[in-house]
Structure formats: C-alpha cells, structure tokens
Amino acid sequence: MNIHKLLYQNIIWRGLYYLLTFILNILIARHFKAELTGVIYYLVNIYAFITLIASVSLESGLIYFASSKKISQSKLFSFSIIWVACIALLMAVLFFGIVLFSEIKITSIEFLYALLFVCGNLLFTFLNSLFYADNKFKVPNVTGIVFNSVLIALIFFFNKFSWLTNEKYILIYFAAFLLQGITLIIIFITEHPGNKFQLPAFSQIKMLFQYCLLAFASNLVTFLYYRVDYWFVHQYRSPVELGNYVQVSKLAQMFFVLPGILAGAVFPITAGGRRQEINDILMILSRSILFLYGIACLIFAI
C-alpha cells in the first residue's frame, strides 16, 4: 500500500480511537466527580506501571522482528500469548503471597482489576504490534473504538439502566481491556488460519530480549517522567485535588497523541525496509504538527 495512505489511515483510525478515549475520560470525570475519579485513575496509574514492567517493551521487538521478517509472525504470536499467561500466573502468586505473608492490604477486587487491566493491555498491545507489522492499522483501532463506544454509551445513559451501579461500571471498564485483547486474538487467528503454535528458538528469544530491553529502559524513564507526579499528589493532597490534577494532566498529554500516532505507523514501515520512502513525507508532517501545536500553545497562553 502507498505510504501516504498507510500514514493517513493510521492517523484517522488511531485519532478516532484517542478521541473516544478522551470523551470517555470526560464522561467518567463528570459522573464519578473529582474525588472518585482520582481514585480510579490513581489505580490505573499503578496498573499501567505494572503493565510497563510486565511487558519489558516486548511490543517494540514484536513490531521490529515481524516487520523485518527476522522471526516468523506465528512464533512471535505464540510467544506473546505464553508471556501474558506467565504474567497472569505470576500476579496470582504474588497476590496470594502478599495476602498470606505480608501486612500490605490488597483486596480481591483490586487484584481482579489489576489482572484485567494488565493482561488485557498486554494482549492488546502485543496483538496491536503484530497487526501494525502487517501494516494493518484499522483492525486494532476499530476494536478499541467499538469497546470505547460501548463504555461511553453505558455511562452516558447510566440512569437508563436500572441494573447498572458505579461498582458494576468500574468492573465493566476494567474487563473491557481484557475483552479487547481476546477479540484481537480471535481476529488474528481467523486472519492467519495456517499458522501453527510454535515458539521461537532460544537464539531468537535472546535476540528479541536484547532488542526489547533497550526500549524498556527508555520507556521506563519516560513513564516515570510523565506519571511519577501522580504518586506525589496522592500522598500530599486531597482526593479531590488528585482527581482535578489527573484530568489536567491528561489534557496536557493529548499533545503527545499525534506524534505517537505517527511513530506507531512509521516504525513498522521503516523496520520493513522502506525508510527512504518515508523521509520526505515525515519531514512535512513533523513541521505541520509543530505549526499546529505552536498555534494551540499561543491560544492557550492568551
């Protein structure tokens, strides 16, 4: 497919996905108010950190080695599923160990939320990487759009559903992450019926982790740079102030969405050996983003 079409396709579908995520965050904040919203997103921040550690940035290696054909996609898919299953088992062992042998208080519902969020995001991220390696940007984003639309509809018409409570909505919210991942697994298997379950050779796994750990170090620093303040605000300010702070922080992070969308499309294309083709259009897009963000910042300053 033409590179221009690939980039614009990703911008449209990924952009729509992020737009719905933004709308969902606003509706959650309006419904649960600042105090409870702060608690929800504080938990999400903790779970996101666990997800980052558990992933060891495997998604970057999946895109690179699948795009460059250095490791077959079926082997990477199989390894991803095994990895997520091992993370789920490890989380269960740690939870029961903490409950039995530690004074740290973790409720079963908090563990369930963590399990749904972490495993769901790992599956979604890993499968998203494999689809992107095939230059299929539409499938994973449409999946996310569908689930976000359902969550938006549920909270928008919250009072219309007599069975729906705050507790049930929060459970559905976290369960949606795992359901997205499972949906992508089903779609991937359907689109690759000939793939057999086979794991990479030890030398390939070693090569994969050597690549991923470099990306992991960078992602870990970036995560702490943008999210560590949540823990400080939670420690020293009220729940209401935390909720307001998280919302403002999320608005600021919207500026990273468009460059992130482009990076998600550019990486698999360049890894596939089409680096020269993308140089010119990337220069134009980068300047356009800088111009748009400059205008936006000027408006905010005024």
Image (cartoon, rainbow, N blue to C red):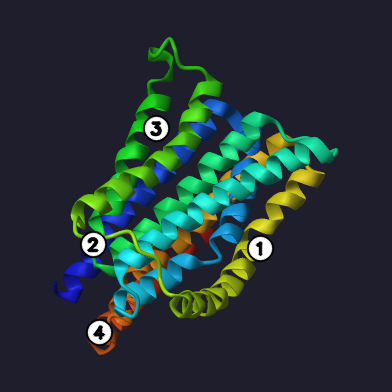
Q: Which of the two marks, 1 or 4, is nearer to us in this view?
A: 4
Q: CA distance from mark 4 to mark 3?
A: 38 Å
Which type of secondary structure does the marked residue at label 1 adopt? helix
- Which-is-in-front pick, marks 4 and 3? 4
Q: Earlier in the sequence, mark 1 or mark 4?
A: 1
Viewed as shown, does residue 185 lie left or right of 49? left
Check the image and name the residue furthest to the top.
162
Q: Give the spatial CA distance, label 2 vs label 4.
A: 16 Å
Badge 2 density bin: few <14, some 14–19, many ≥20, Cα 10 Å: some
Q: Position of residue 239 (x, y in %)?
A: 72, 35
Provide the residue designation for mark 4: 274
Give the Cα separation between the discs numbered 2 and 3.
25 Å
Q: Which residue is mark 1?
A: 224
Q: Earlier in the sequence, mark 2 or mark 1?
A: 2
Vertical comparison of 113 with 7: above or below: above
Disc 2: which residue: 136
Q: Residues within 10 Å of mark 3 (few under 14, many from 20)?
A: many
Give the x, y percent position of residue 89: 58, 47
CB under 8 Å between callouts 4 and 3? no
Amino acid residing under circle 4 = Arg
Q: CA distance from mark 3 to mark 1?
A: 28 Å
Task: Residue type at mark 1: give it.
Answer: Leu
Q: Disc 3 on helix, strand or loop?
A: helix
For disc 1, the neighbor class at 10 Å (few under 14, some 14 to 19, many from 20) is: few
Figure check: 39 above or below 82: above
